Image (tube, coloured by chain):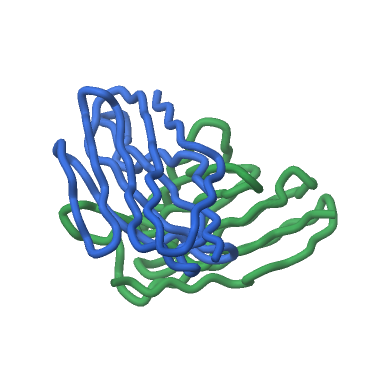
Amino acid sequence: GQNIDQPTEMTATEGAIVQINCTYQTSGFNGLFWYQQHAGEAPTFLSYNVLDGLEEKGRFSSFLSRSKGYSYLLLKELQMKDSASYLCAVRGFGGGSYIPTFGRGTSLIVHP
Amino acid sequence: SAVISQKPSRDICQRGTSLTIQCQVDSQVTMMFWYRQQPGQSLTLIATANQGSEATYESGFVIDKFPISRPNLTFSTLTVSNMSPEDSSIYLCSVPSGRSSDTQYFGPGTRLTVL
């Protein structure tokens, strides 16, 4: 089975940096995803990590450590529009696990 | 990227009735997925809709409660049968992106409230 843990809620100030952590326990590992979901909207893909290290994409970066079962999403220069839920999802191996398992999401509130 | 539409976008239904949710994709895809997102909960996979064969259901979900149709490669329906208030949720369909990372595109979701 798979177990994914991330904080329920975080708050941050506009212009600041915030790091959202995700820890996981899986039977095998075949990629970790971060999605952004605004209230009432569909999740949209942010990043994909399959190897250890940092992947940078504009203001967003995602880090993975497979040995620690750990990832984080780093958001820089926060904007009000970044207020959303951030979902960590992990894909394992075998048994039809092509489909990732999603965490409960971290609700990020950005205030002025 | 794939464009996915869902109908209805929201509905309020009475206990004991059934609702069929439609999902339309603007390109042909082999697999379509149906998820449920209950308030404050994660996205939970209900089933994978395969064209030309029966849907594959995840643990805890059964065909009698959530029958699925997949008549062609661009369309699928999910029916929520004999609804109870516990079925109140957002239902989303999703398709693989087709890229090497195999990310997913999600539809806008159907917000269902059962009274």
Q: Is residue A52 above or below residue B68?
A: above
Q: Is residue B43 visible?
A: no
Q: Quadrant of the N terminus of chain A?
A: top left
**Image position, residue A5 (x, y; %):** 45, 31
Residue at the image position 54 percent from the left and 50 percent from the top: A11
Position of B51 with respect to B78 (left or right) is left
**Image position, residue B59 (x, y; %):** 51, 31
Residue at the image position 35 percent from the left and 24 percent from the top: A25
Q: Is residue B111 above or below residue B38?
A: below
Q: For this rendering, which residue is in front, B9 or B61?
A: B9
Position of A3 with respect to A111 (left or right) is left
Q: Is residue A81 above or below residue B36?
A: below
**Image position, residue B104 (x, y; %):** 34, 57
Q: Colour of chain B?
A: green
Q: Colour of chain A?
A: blue
Residue at the image position 55 percent from the left and 56 percent from the top: A109
Q: For this rendering, which residue is in front, B65 or B46?
A: B46
**Image position, residue A74 (x, y; %):** 32, 50
Name the image quarter holding residue B8. bottom right
Residue at the image position 43 percent from the left and 71 percent from the top: B4
Q: Is residue A56 visible?
A: yes
Position of B5 with respect to B18 (left or right) is left
Q: For this rendering, which residue is in front, B59 or A76?
A: A76
Q: Quadrant of the C terminus of chain A?
A: bottom right
